[in-house]
Image: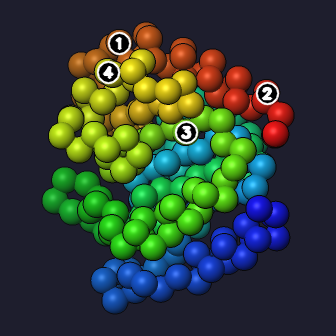
């Protein structure tokens, strides 16, 4: 897949209006893809701040995620290094206890097609349960169980909780995450970035 072809797909995504009638605030698909990307961030869906700015993880969650990954904004927003492909490309709106789930039609329409073109990905980081359920087919497990089981998955995949400040209690209750998983995450990120495309 050439970058010109990836650019066409990216433009098609940005012009997508499949969910327009279901989103009162309008659509603004937010992705970051490049043919040379080595790390894939598979997230949930843009929040309101990202919807308004059009910049993925341009919020407190993004600050924490970059800290977890051990990279700065320059690396994170370099599409030749990091691809960002949420389960839903548009902000789904606010629910009773946080944002609503990503609309399923987005992944059903776009996800496999885009993933098939990201041929240089060395590490896929699964942020939150929606991405984990899709990529790992672990729908019967809790997020905590899936993240605790991180060592049973291939080295090319790591499941994480969502880095939202709403998860501060979870992080306090699960100190093993910072002690054991985060150092391994940083190691794998550095390893993936150091690898040359095939």
Q: Residues within 10 Å of mark 2 (few under 14, many from 20)?
A: few
Q: Check residue 53 in the rendering and tell me which mark sits there, or answer none.
A: none
Question: What SS does tag 2 mark?
Answer: helix
Question: What SS does tag 4 mark?
Answer: helix
Q: Residues within 10 Å of mark 1 (few under 14, many from 20)?
A: few
Q: Residues within 10 Å of mark 4 (few under 14, many from 20)?
A: some
Q: Is residue 65 above or below residue 10?
A: above
Q: Are marks 3 and 1 in contact (CB under 8 Å)?
A: no
Observer-nearest residue: 190 or 139? 139
Single out the mark in the foreground, 2 or 1.
2
Q: CA distance from mark 2 to mark 1?
A: 27 Å
- Quarter residue 72 falls in: top right
125 sits to left or right of 191: left
Q: CA distance from mark 3 to mark 1?
A: 21 Å
Q: CA distance from mark 3 to mark 4?
A: 17 Å
Q: Are marks 1 and 4 in contact (CB under 8 Å)?
A: yes
175 sits to left or right of 188: left
Q: Is residue 91 above or below residue 42?
A: below
Q: Check residue 194 in the rendering and tell me which mark sits there, or answer none.
A: 2
Q: Where is the N terminus found, in terms of image quarters?
A: bottom right
Label 3 sits on residue: 124
């Amino acid at each position: 897949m050439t970058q010109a072809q990836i650019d066409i797909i990216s433009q098609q995504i940005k012009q997508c209006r499949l969910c327009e009638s279901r989103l009162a605030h309008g659509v603004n698909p937010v992705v970051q893809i490049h043919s040379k990307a080595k790390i894939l961030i598979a997230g949930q869906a843009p929040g309101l701040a990202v919807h308004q700015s059009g910049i993925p993880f341009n919020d407190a969650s993004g600050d924490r995620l970059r800290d977890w990954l051990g990279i700065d904004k320059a690396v994170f927003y370099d599409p030749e290094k990091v691809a960002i492909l949420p389960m839903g490309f548009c902000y789904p709106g606010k629910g009773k206890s946080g944002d609503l789930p990503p609309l399923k039609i987005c992944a059903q329409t776009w996800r496999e097609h885009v993933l098939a073109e990201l041929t240089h990905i060395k590490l896929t980081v699964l942020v939150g349960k929606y991405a984990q359920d899709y990529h790992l087919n672990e729908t019967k497990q809790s997020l905590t169980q899936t993240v605790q089981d991180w060592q049973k998955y291939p080295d090319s995949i790591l499941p994480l909780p969502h880095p939202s400040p709403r998860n501060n209690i979870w992080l306090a209750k699960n100190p093993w995450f910072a002690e054991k998983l985060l150092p391994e995450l940083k190691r794998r990120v550095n390893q993936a970035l150091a690898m040359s495309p095939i």
